Amino acid sequence: SRRGLRARRPAAERPAQPGAAPGGAVGAMEPRSWNPHIYTEVIRGYTAHSLREIDRVRRNLMGLSEDDKNELVWKPEEQVAKMKGAVLSNMTFLNKISGMIDKAAPLDNPDHPHGVKPIQVL
């Protein structure tokens, strides 16, 4: 006897799961309208998150005792400056992408992007 195993009901008899196609196929999402401008919102969120992370790291590193600061490979000021420089580089690149998205012509068929990757639409 196999304890804990139950026979599965046929797909037609099972309740539909969110995002499932008719007939119960899980993972088959119904097509949604594709809007490249959602990426500008994601980029804005990334920017805000990154700036909060810089502040968090600065607070944590500056809050260390002098003994702990002396054990660090890089001084806290250097670490925060390097992190800030990296975030600014990312933001510069992502702002260019946002600008391209904002200037992009509307899609002929907004149901899906024309390329394999969404950025190919630009």
Image (tube, rainbow, N blue to C red):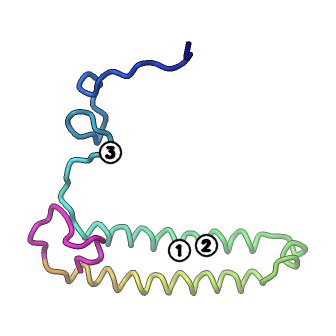
The residue stretch that appears in magenta: 106-122
Side of 23 relative to 39 (left or right)? left
Residue in the foreground of this view, choosing between 39 and 109: 109
Q: Is residue 11 left or right of residue 2?
A: left
Q: Which residue is mark 2?
A: 55
The residue that label 3 is drawn on is: 27
Residue 102 circle label: none
The amino acid at mark 3 is Gly
Q: Residue at x 78, y 83 (%)?
A: 74
Dot 3 or dot 1, earlier in sequence:
3
User: Element type at marker 1?
Assistant: helix
Classify mark 1: residues with Cα within 10 Å, few (<14), some (14-19) or many (20+): some
Q: Secondary structure at mark 3?
A: loop
Q: Which residue is mark 1?
A: 51
Asked if disc 2 and disc 1 are in contact, CB closer than 8 Å, the reply is yes
Q: Residues within 10 Å of mark 2 (few under 14, many from 20)?
A: some
On screen, residue 69 versus residue 37, left or right, reads right
Q: Amino acid at mark 2?
A: Asp
